[in-house]
Amino acid sequence: MTGYTVTIRRSDLTTYSSDLVNCDMSSSLSTSCTVPVSVLRASPFSLPWGSSVYAKVSAKNIYGASVVSLGGNGAIITTKPDAPVSLTENIALRTKSQLSFTWSDPAFTGGASIIDYRVKMAVDTGSY
């Protein structure tokens, strides 16, 4: 074995291209490479948040290159969501012993579904 060729699917869902800066495996026997999300989000890949990242690999030796592997989905491009918006107290549910809050999901969820919320509060000028 003399190396590998790794290609990543572009946002057109058809064309595959190589990232020769971060994932040039042409003379490497390593079976992994790391591509920054910023590279996948930029041209030529232009993958949006929440995209599955599909890649194909072929192996090379002194006799030539193998057939290209099937496209594998190794990751989904995600990041932290924006903060929820429109936080208000639901006064109709206020009692002597409880308060109720409502809010809306952020416009940008980071490319994945919101799975839970963490609510913090402070009394008067205290810490959260």
Image (cartoon, rainbow, N blue to C red):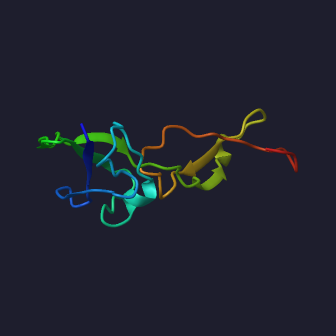
Which residue occupies the foreground of this view, 58 or 101?
Answer: 58
Report the quarter where the N terminus lies: top left
Give the farthest residue toward the bottom. 43
State the count of labels: 0
Residue at screen point 43% across, 44% down: 113
**In terms of depth relative to the viewer, which is nearer, 79 or 92?**
79
The residue positioned farthest toward the right in the image shown: 125
Residue farthest toward the front in the current orientation of the protein: 62
In the drawing, does residue 45 fall left or right of residue 114? left
Coordinates of residue 123 in the picture (x, y in percent): 84, 44
If the image is split into quadrants, where does the C terminus sit?
top right
Foreground: 42 or 20? 20
Q: Position of residue 77 (x, y in %)?
A: 40, 49
> With 79 as the anchor, is 102 left or right in this view?
right
Which residue is painted at 45% across and 59% down in the image?
38
Q: Residue at x 64, y 47 (%)?
A: 90
Horizontal side of residue 116 vs 111, given as left or right = right
For this rendering, which residue is in front, 27 or 18? Answer: 27
- In percent of width and height, residue 108 lies at 47, 57
Q: Where does the image place residue 111, in percent across and percent down from the top left?
A: 42, 50
